Image (tube, grey):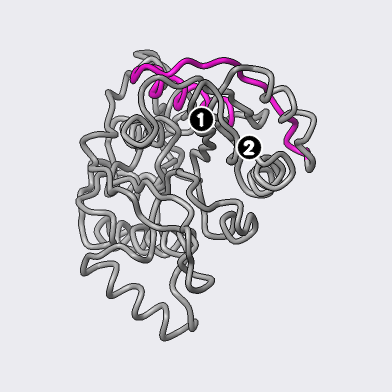
Amino acid sequence: NDTTGKDRKANGFRHFFNGYMSGAALAPVLEKEYGSDRRAYHLTADYTWGWTQQESIAAATEATGWETVNNVLTPLASTDFSAYITPVLNSGADVLVLNHYGGNMVNSLTNAVQDFDLLSKQVNGKDFKIVVPLYSELMAAGAGESVRGVIGSMNYNWQLDNEGSKAFVKSFGEKYGKPPSNSAQTCYAQVLLYADACERAGTFNPCGVAEALEGFEFDGLGNGPTLYRAEDHQCFKDVLVVKGAENPTNAYDTLEIVEVTPRAQVEYAPDHPMFGGAEASLGSCNPGA
C-alpha cells in the first residue's frame, strides 16, 4: 500500500493492484464461501508488502464479521515454516491466512497442507481453510497439489473471456507456445502504456510522460475500463479472485477464476488513512536532468 500511499512519488506509477484492493476483492468471496463467523490466524512476511497486505485483509475480513486471532511475523529468508504453523493448531483459529509471496508462499503453503494436513481438519465445527491473498502462476506451480481449492487474488489471468485478453493470449501463444502469465501480461501492458504516453506527450522527459499518464483512462488490455488516478498514480481496474483448480488438465490451468471484482468495489479515497491520509503527497517531478 505504501508505494502509492504514504511513499507516493510524482515519477512513480503502479499498474499492479495493492493490498487494500486485494482485501476488498477477497472479503466478500470469503464470506460467501466460508461464512462470517470465522477466526483467522495470520502468518505475515516481515517487510512492507507483508505488513500492509495483512493490515488490509484483516480489516476487510473483520468488516464481514471475522475475528483475527493472531498475526505472527516471519523472516523473509524463511524456508521452513513448521515452527510457525504448529501454534495455529492450538489457537482456536479455523482459517490460516498466508500473507506470503513467491518462495515464502510456496514453502508455507506446502508445510501447512502436506506436512500438517490442515485442510483435512475441523475446528469450531467448521472445515479448516487456508487463504493466500496474492497469487501467481509460478507460485501455484511451485506449490503443486497444495493449492487445490485455496482462494486468493490475482492481477490478470489468461482465461479471462474478453476481446483484449483473447487477442493477447493468441499472439503470445503463437510466439512462445504457452499462454501468458500474470507477470507477462503486466509487463507487456506497462511497456505499451509507457510507449503510448511518450507518443502522446511527444517527449521522453519523465515529467511530460507523467503528465500524459495522470488521469489517463483506457480499455482493451484485459482488465476492463482502467484509470491511472492523478492524485496518487495508482492504477484502478478489475481485480480477480481465483482458487487452485481441483482437477487441472495441464500446467497452465492450475488456477481458476472465481470472480471478476469490478473496479468500483476496490476503489478508495486518495487520502484514505491506510494510504498516508491527507498529508500524503506526490511531491514534484524530477526531470532527470
Outermost residue, front direction? 125
Amino acid type, mark 2: Leu
Viewer-proximal residue, 66 or 287?
Answer: 66
Disc marking residue 53: 1
Q: Is residue 36 visible to the viewer in this orientation of the structure? A: yes
What is the crowding at mark 1: few (fewer than 14 residues within 10 Å), some, or many (at least 20)?
Answer: many
Residue in the picture at 48% in, 49% down: 149
Q: Quadrant of residue 90?
A: top right
Percent x, y for residue 156?
Answer: 38, 56
Instruction: Compare marks 1 and 2 and give the one earlier in the sequence.
Output: 1
**Residue 42 appears left or right of 150:** right
Viewer-proximal residue, 98 or 198?
Answer: 98
Viewer-proximal residue, 160 or 11?
Answer: 160
Percent x, y for residue 52?
Answer: 52, 26
What is the crowding at mark 2: few (fewer than 14 residues within 10 Å), some, or many (at least 20)?
Answer: many
Looking at the image, is mark 1 or mark 2 nearer the viewer? 2
Residue in the picture at 45% in, 33% down: 19
Amino acid type, mark 1: Gln
Instruction: Look at the image and say whether residue 28 sits in the magenta stretch.
Output: no
Query: What distance separates the C-alpha of mark 1 from that of mark 2?
Result: 23 Å
Q: Quadrant of residue 59?
A: top left
**Residue 120 appears left or right of 259:** right
Regarding mark 1 in the picture, which secondary structure is present there? helix
Q: Does 248 sit above or below residue 28? A: below
Residue numbers of the magenta segment: 49-78
Q: Does 252 sit above or below residue 155? A: below
Percent x, y for residue 147?
Answer: 55, 51
Regarding mark 2 in the picture, which secondary structure is present there? helix
User: What residue is pinned by disc 2?
Assistant: 118
Residue in the picture at 65% in, 30% down: 47
Q: Is residue 49 visible to the viewer in this orientation of the structure? A: no
**Residue 224 appears left or right of 81:** left
